[in-house]
Amino acid sequence: MTKSKLLDSLKLEQDRQDLIKLARKFGVKEVDLDWCARKLGDGLYLGLNWKNIGDAEAAIIAETLKVNSSVKHIDIAGNDIGDVGAAALAEMLKENSTITTINVYQNQIGDVGAIALAEALKINSSVTNIRFGQNQICDAGTAVLAEALKVNGSVKQIDLVSNQI
Protein backbone atom coordinates (compact mmCIF):
# COMPACT_ATOMS: atom_id res chain seq x y z
CA MET A 1 0.00 0.00 0.00
CA THR A 2 1.36 3.40 -0.93
CA LYS A 3 1.85 6.08 1.69
CA SER A 4 -0.94 8.15 0.12
CA LYS A 5 -3.44 5.26 0.22
CA LEU A 6 -2.49 4.48 3.79
CA LEU A 7 -3.07 8.11 4.82
CA ASP A 8 -6.43 8.12 3.02
CA SER A 9 -7.43 4.92 4.80
CA LEU A 10 -6.42 6.33 8.18
CA LYS A 11 -8.33 9.56 7.51
CA LEU A 12 -11.43 7.58 6.51
CA GLU A 13 -11.27 5.54 9.72
CA GLN A 14 -10.74 8.66 11.86
CA ASP A 15 -13.74 10.33 10.22
CA ARG A 16 -15.77 7.15 10.81
CA GLN A 17 -14.85 7.18 14.50
CA ASP A 18 -15.96 10.83 14.70
CA LEU A 19 -19.33 9.82 13.24
CA ILE A 20 -19.65 7.01 15.79
CA LYS A 21 -19.09 9.55 18.59
CA LEU A 22 -21.76 11.77 17.02
CA ALA A 23 -24.21 8.86 16.75
CA ARG A 24 -23.64 8.02 20.42
CA LYS A 25 -24.67 11.59 21.33
CA PHE A 26 -28.03 10.88 19.74
CA GLY A 27 -28.57 7.68 21.68
CA VAL A 28 -27.76 5.19 18.94
CA LYS A 29 -27.38 1.75 20.49
CA GLU A 30 -23.92 0.19 20.41
CA VAL A 31 -25.17 -2.63 18.20
CA ASP A 32 -26.31 -0.09 15.56
CA LEU A 33 -23.21 2.13 15.50
CA ASP A 34 -21.51 0.29 12.65
CA TRP A 35 -24.64 0.66 10.53
CA CYS A 36 -25.03 4.39 11.34
CA ALA A 37 -21.45 5.18 10.37
CA ARG A 38 -20.47 2.65 7.76
CA LYS A 39 -18.16 2.59 4.81
CA LEU A 40 -19.97 2.86 1.52
CA GLY A 41 -17.86 2.66 -1.59
CA ASP A 42 -14.97 5.07 -1.23
CA GLY A 43 -16.68 7.18 1.43
CA LEU A 44 -18.83 7.05 4.52
CA TYR A 45 -22.59 6.86 5.08
CA LEU A 46 -24.13 8.66 8.06
CA GLY A 47 -27.52 7.18 8.90
CA LEU A 48 -29.39 8.91 11.72
CA ASN A 49 -32.94 8.45 10.49
CA TRP A 50 -35.79 8.12 13.00
CA LYS A 51 -33.66 9.36 15.95
CA ASN A 52 -35.85 12.30 17.12
CA ILE A 53 -33.34 14.78 15.77
CA GLY A 54 -34.54 18.37 15.90
CA ASP A 55 -33.03 21.67 14.85
CA ALA A 56 -30.40 21.78 17.62
CA GLU A 57 -29.17 18.29 16.79
CA ALA A 58 -29.17 19.08 13.06
CA ALA A 59 -26.90 22.03 13.82
CA ILE A 60 -24.48 19.70 15.65
CA ILE A 61 -24.50 17.31 12.69
CA ALA A 62 -23.94 20.20 10.29
CA GLU A 63 -21.02 21.56 12.31
CA THR A 64 -19.40 18.11 12.39
CA LEU A 65 -19.81 17.63 8.65
CA LYS A 66 -18.36 21.02 7.70
CA VAL A 67 -14.87 19.59 8.21
CA ASN A 68 -15.52 15.92 7.44
CA SER A 69 -14.17 15.03 4.03
CA SER A 70 -15.19 11.36 4.05
CA VAL A 71 -18.99 11.41 4.37
CA LYS A 72 -20.72 11.13 1.01
CA HIS A 73 -24.23 10.10 2.07
CA ILE A 74 -26.36 11.60 4.85
CA ASP A 75 -29.66 10.00 5.82
CA ILE A 76 -31.53 12.00 8.47
CA ALA A 77 -35.05 11.14 7.35
CA GLY A 78 -37.99 10.78 9.70
CA ASN A 79 -36.87 13.30 12.28
CA ASP A 80 -38.14 16.68 13.52
CA ILE A 81 -35.80 18.94 11.58
CA GLY A 82 -37.42 22.26 10.71
CA ASP A 83 -36.30 25.43 8.98
CA VAL A 84 -33.60 26.27 11.54
CA GLY A 85 -32.00 22.83 11.21
CA ALA A 86 -32.27 23.03 7.42
CA ALA A 87 -30.50 26.40 7.49
CA ALA A 88 -27.67 24.84 9.52
CA LEU A 89 -27.41 22.01 7.00
CA ALA A 90 -27.39 24.59 4.20
CA GLU A 91 -24.44 26.41 5.77
CA MET A 92 -22.60 23.10 5.99
CA LEU A 93 -23.28 22.36 2.32
CA LYS A 94 -21.70 25.67 1.38
CA GLU A 95 -18.41 24.41 2.82
CA ASN A 96 -18.53 20.64 2.35
CA SER A 97 -17.51 19.40 -1.08
CA THR A 98 -17.75 15.63 -0.60
CA ILE A 99 -21.41 14.96 0.24
CA THR A 100 -23.24 13.60 -2.79
CA THR A 101 -26.55 12.44 -1.28
CA ILE A 102 -28.66 14.05 1.42
CA ASN A 103 -31.95 12.59 2.61
CA VAL A 104 -34.13 14.89 4.73
CA TYR A 105 -37.32 13.04 3.82
CA GLN A 106 -40.22 13.27 6.28
CA ASN A 107 -39.07 16.14 8.49
CA GLN A 108 -40.66 19.54 9.16
CA ILE A 109 -38.80 21.65 6.61
CA GLY A 110 -40.83 24.50 5.16
CA ASP A 111 -40.19 27.23 2.63
CA VAL A 112 -37.60 29.04 4.76
CA GLY A 113 -35.51 25.88 5.09
CA ALA A 114 -35.96 24.99 1.42
CA ILE A 115 -34.84 28.49 0.42
CA ALA A 116 -31.72 28.19 2.63
CA LEU A 117 -30.91 24.81 1.07
CA ALA A 118 -31.54 26.20 -2.41
CA GLU A 119 -29.02 28.99 -1.77
CA ALA A 120 -26.49 26.37 -0.67
CA LEU A 121 -27.10 24.34 -3.82
CA LYS A 122 -26.12 27.37 -5.87
CA ILE A 123 -22.65 27.06 -4.33
CA ASN A 124 -22.29 23.33 -3.70
CA SER A 125 -21.18 21.23 -6.65
CA SER A 126 -20.91 17.80 -5.01
CA VAL A 127 -24.56 17.01 -4.17
CA THR A 128 -26.13 14.90 -6.91
CA ASN A 129 -29.19 13.52 -5.10
CA ILE A 130 -31.42 15.23 -2.55
CA ARG A 131 -34.66 13.94 -1.01
CA PHE A 132 -37.04 16.60 0.33
CA GLY A 133 -40.19 14.45 0.22
CA GLN A 134 -42.88 14.67 2.92
CA ASN A 135 -41.87 18.01 4.39
CA GLN A 136 -43.81 21.28 4.55
CA ILE A 137 -42.41 22.91 1.41
CA CYS A 138 -44.88 25.07 -0.53
CA ASP A 139 -44.78 26.83 -3.89
CA ALA A 140 -42.38 29.59 -2.76
CA GLY A 141 -39.73 27.12 -1.60
CA THR A 142 -40.18 25.00 -4.70
CA ALA A 143 -39.75 28.02 -6.97
CA VAL A 144 -36.46 28.99 -5.32
CA LEU A 145 -35.23 25.39 -5.54
CA ALA A 146 -36.06 25.39 -9.25
CA GLU A 147 -34.06 28.59 -9.74
CA ALA A 148 -31.11 27.12 -7.84
CA LEU A 149 -31.11 24.07 -10.09
CA LYS A 150 -30.65 26.35 -13.09
CA VAL A 151 -27.30 27.37 -11.57
CA ASN A 152 -26.31 24.02 -10.06
CA GLY A 153 -25.05 21.53 -12.60
CA SER A 154 -24.44 18.62 -10.24
CA VAL A 155 -27.91 17.75 -8.87
CA LYS A 156 -29.30 14.94 -11.00
CA GLN A 157 -32.19 13.86 -8.80
CA ILE A 158 -34.46 15.79 -6.45
CA ASP A 159 -37.49 14.37 -4.65
CA LEU A 160 -40.25 16.75 -3.54
CA VAL A 161 -43.10 14.23 -3.28
CA SER A 162 -45.86 14.84 -0.72
CA ASN A 163 -45.08 18.44 0.13
CA GLN A 164 -47.52 21.38 0.11
CA ILE A 165 -47.01 22.07 -3.60
Image: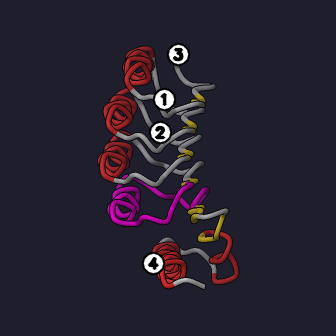
Residue, disc 3:
165
Left or right of 20 in this view: 57: left
Compute the Cα span from label 3 to label 4. 38 Å
Task: Give the x, y percent position of residue 54.
Answer: 43, 54
Task: Give the x, y percent position of residue 3.
Answer: 49, 85
Compute the Cα span from label 1 to label 2. 6 Å
Of 23 and 13, which appears nearest the observer? 13
Label 2 or label 3, whichever lies nearer to me, is 3
Circle nearer the N terminus (4, 1): 4
How packed is label 1: few (under 14 Cα within 10 Å), some, or many (20 or more)? Answer: many
Instruction: Give the residue type at disc 3.
Output: Ile
Seen in the picture, residue 49 relative to 133 is either above or below; the reply is: below
Task: Give the x, y percent position of residue 8.
Answer: 50, 76
Q: Are marks 2 and 3 in contact (CB under 8 Å)?
A: no
Q: Toward which corner of the image does residue 157 lie, by quadrant? A: top right
Of 31 and 65, which appears nearest the observer? 65
Q: Which mark is residue 108?
A: 2
Q: Is residue 25 visible?
A: no
Residue, disc 4:
18
Task: State the residue at coordinates (58%, 31%).
Answer: 156
Instruction: Give the residue type at disc 4.
Output: Asp
